[in-house]
Image (spheres, coloured by chain):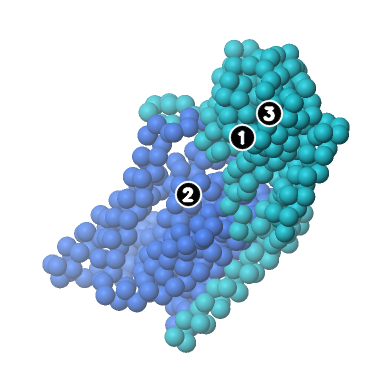
Chain colours: A cyan, B blue
Amino acid sequence: MKIFLYILSIIFLINGVNAREPVLSKVLNDDINITASFDGAKIIVYGAIDPKLYNDSIVIITILGPRLKLKVSQKKKYFGIWLVNANNAHFINAPGYYAIASSNSNFNNVDSPFLRENQIGWKNLKINMHNSIDLKNNKDFYRNILKIFYKNRNLLVIEKSSIDILDGTLFRADFDLPGITPTGKYKVNTFLVNKEGELLSSWNNEVKVTKGGMGAYLYDYSKNHSFLYGLFAALGAILLGFTASEVFRRI
Amino acid sequence: MEIYLPIAGLPINVFILMFLGLVVGFLSGMFGVGGGFLMTPMLILMGIPPAVAVASEANHILAASVSGFLAHMRRADVDFLMGFILLLGGVLGSIIGVFLLKYLLSIGQEKLFISLSYILILIFVGFWMLAESVSSIKKKNKGKRNKLHEHIWLHGLPFKIKFRKSHLYISVLPPMFIGLLVGILSSIMGIGGGFILVPAMIYILGMPTQVVIGTSLLQIVFVTTVSTIMHSYINQTVDVVLSSLLLIGAVVGAQMGTRAMVLLRGEQIRFLLAIIILIVASVLIGGILVTPDEAFIIETYKDAQ
């Protein structure tokens, strides 16, 4: 069924490319549900470009996760012990996930006003900080910490070249979301730019990542009915303990 | 097989959790302690946020200690009056502990505070038990006999009452104070407090050993009930999926441990427990001395309202 849809959409895309837009794309799974068995997911983006533009263009796909407020605390060594520094830096709109892939391995060296203005690429992404501490010299430092943190958790995916273009028109790119990926809306943007990094065409998609099933219910319940949640947790534990003791008395 | 923990917000292997439950359950059945002091650091090492580890562990201990308490109640070795006095302090202490944790969370020092309290208490209790068990093994070999209990100045404080089950006539202040202290530690550190309560009741209050474990379990049941509810209400950090998975292994382990216990003498058990406590302490000391992979912590935050 999925393959059938896939083929159908490609036909639609190719027609679309010829008729209207030089680039079109679609996300195969735009509704990702975090259920009990969730261990990460794949966002699969496929699309087509106008074959006439194949030789002089680069396809770029970016995925921008929901914006989060993040607090960064440094660990420092005092008296030989690693302590957490009480001075925190605050990012007010850090992306919860960021991925970029392109069809050209030279893309990393491309710089253009368009890329900068549209915040394409990790280095062009605007992430603002709360001015609670002196950040004049530290902004790059904290941003680098953020980068290391994201990379270690696969929340930041920067691939030099990972989009293959078939027959000069069809492309597909896979992005891995780790298990700890935040819930919210993920913006999937596909850009077609020339070798100088100027826009030829673009297309936007959106992926929703939501908690689902029992886990979502428990999470919401713990937030909205905290006291009752605690009461039920305690009662449940007492019942489990009682059951266990009864069961083992009989063995 | 991975399962997504809804409150902790990360996937974790089910079998590792159940195995951890089994091992800690075995130790708790063998030594008569809740095992929280082993479990909480392990959960934190596995990447579960400390505040979630502590609160969920309180819920796990509640279930484990209910089953232990019922077994002791059937054998009638519970001093309910002493349990009630300990509780007066304990419930107050656990409420204080939850608010203290909330404060520590707000200044971002909860990780350090939790690991430092662990290290200090584990070292103290570990060495004490080690010294005590070694000396009683030596005494046993010489064939001397201990007195039923010794009176110390604490017992002479005002508000004395009679504890028939424990054969004691002492002031209510020391048990209340012990209860308070254990209650605070219990909600901050995610432990039942058995490994502090049991030695305190034997050595400070002078209670007979056979009554101690059942009575300490009574206290633990009530204190962890309060801290489960309070942690859920104030901090929203109890992950019931996590605590139930731990429990599945723990109930089986506890029964195996109880059966293994019969093979050892009392002071040998205390000696082994002391060694385990000191090993956990040294792992934790390593944790704050060794240079971390990431010299920073990044967490989401909410704006102050």
Label at residue A60: 3
Residue at 57% over, 73% down: A240
Q: How many marks?
A: 3
Chain for disc number 2 = B
Tell me the CA gap for discs 2 and 1. 38 Å
State if disc 1 and disc 2 touch (CB < 8 Å). no
Is B78 displayed left or right of A221 in the figure?
left
- 2 vs 3, front mark: 3
- Give the SS element for disc 2: loop
- Give the SS element for disc 1: strand
Tell me the CA gap for discs 1 and 3. 11 Å
Percent coordinates x, y for residue B102 in the rendering: 63, 43
Label at residue B24: none
Nearest the eye: B30 or A51:
A51
Nearest the eye: B11 or B40:
B11
Residue A131 in sight here: no
State if disc 3 and disc 2 touch (CB < 8 Å). no
Tell me the CA gap for discs 2 and 3. 37 Å
- 1 vs 3, front mark: 1
- 2 vs 1, front mark: 1
- Give the SS element for disc 3: strand
**Relative to A213, residue B298 above or below:** above
Q: Mark 2 points at which residue?
A: B46
Labels 2 and 1 positioned on one and the same chain: no
Q: In which quarter of the image is residue A154?
A: top right
- Amino acid under disc 3: Ile
State if disc 3 and disc 1 touch (CB < 8 Å). no
Q: Residues within 10 Å of mark 2 (few under 14, many from 20)?
A: few
Q: Name the residue under label 1.
A: A164
